[in-house]
Image (cartoon, grey):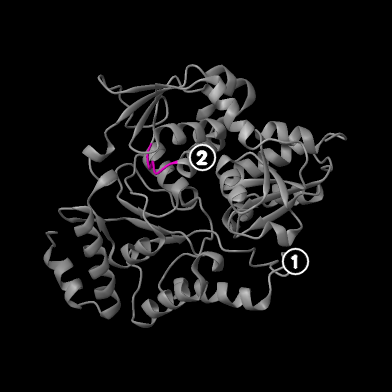
Amino acid sequence: MVQLTPEEKGMLAGSLGEGVALAMESVVRVAEVLGAPRLVKVSSAHISGVSYKNLGEEGVEFLEELAAKGARFSVPTTVNPAGFDMEVYREMGVGEEEYELQMRIVRALASMGARVTLSCTPYLINPPSFGDHLAWAESNAVLYANSVIGARTNREGGPLSVLEAIVGRAPYVGLHTDEGRAPTVVVDAGGVRSFVERTGAVSALGYLLGAKVKAGVPLLVNAPRNLAHPGNLRLFLAAVGAASSIGMVLVEGVSPEFKRVEGLKEIALEEGELERVLGKWSGEAFDAVVLGCPHLSPGELAELASRLGGRRVKGRVLVFTSRWAVSRAADAVEALRRSGVEVYADTCMVVGNLSALGVRRCATDSAKAAFYLSNQGYEVVLAPRNFLLKAVLSSQR
């Protein structure tokens, strides 16, 4: 039995309206299934799965019904990428019917009080603090919040995060609890450290860790030094999430809650295993380089523009980022576009439609993108960003 406070009991009984009561009923039911003793107040929510491709008509009607019943988000709430760039959707091959379906989703979320960020990196836009409880439903964001900031959130499903945002509560279970955040296995990256530092294969490292550990809270020791770079850390954690159900990695030298623990099972990563991950998505021919899974930060946009140095790219380069980042790196974005780079906001290569942009074979630095795009039928090459940039600046490819 989930113990509710008087306030929560009132919400369940309808004191704040039908929409809140429906949301509370569902959150309590989930808490009961998970064996949570109580609910915990959250300071923010992040909703995933909001593209028209993910939700469809039934999902749109679900959001519209909640909004019509008076449900409003009670905590700051941000939103994952949509199916296209809102400003250039026609150029992306999006028809008016698809556009209107996506806009119904946006309008419903906005009417409930969401900040329609359309980005998978809420930790950049609305960063939580250490110890904050959250209701976040984007795997890379969950991993970043838990692993790097020390905030507390489970990997929520998209619909559940909507309901948790309305009631401002989440089941007190899993990564919300001290015991749920204790390390379960030690992962030693010493055997691949020099390889990753030499090649920049941080995303492949994340995928390998996720695939080998699968669940729990890994304690990563002897991590490559370049893993601490913010962009590399995001690529690494996103790949962990794509390959597993893991919601937190305690990274030596990075995670505020890192502490060595004796008596745990140990897994040693080997260079050959990392090479096999890269070999899983290998090749030389591609239609375009796609970057931004997770969305590129303002700093990464500036870094990319600096790296190109005004030179024209050879072939197509597609960059995905947030409208928030574009506004904070406007000069860099203009420089990238002058170099021939296509910059898209509001969406990403995974939830958008690359084929409508004429891309069927792509190269990326993100193992998360490689995993999902290959499952969608695309031919994918996975390689470190430095390698890809050299390729698009070379006359030979």
Instruction: Classify mark 2: helix, strand or loop.
Output: helix
Does the image show residue 82? yes
What residue do we see at 68% from left, 49% from top? 319
Considering only order in the chain, which callout, 1 or 2, is on the residue closer to the N terminus? Answer: 1
Identify the amino acid type marked 1: Glu
Residue under numbered circle 1: 91
User: Dot 1 surroundings within 10 Å: few (below 14), some, or many (20 or more)?
Assistant: few
Identify the amino acid type marked 2: Ala
* Image quadrant assignment for residue 347: bottom right
Q: Where is residue 300 in the image (x, y as percent from the top left)?
A: 62, 41
Q: What stretch is highlighted in magenta?
A: 244-248
Quick check: is 116 in the magenta stretch?
A: no
Q: Which residue lies furthest to the bottom in this view?
A: 68
From the viewer's perspective, is residue 375 above or below residue 267?
A: below
What residue do we see at 68% from left, 74% from top? 95
What residue do we see at 54% from left, 39% from top? 235
From the viewer's perspective, is residue 144 above or below residue 198?
A: below
Residue under numbered circle 2: 239
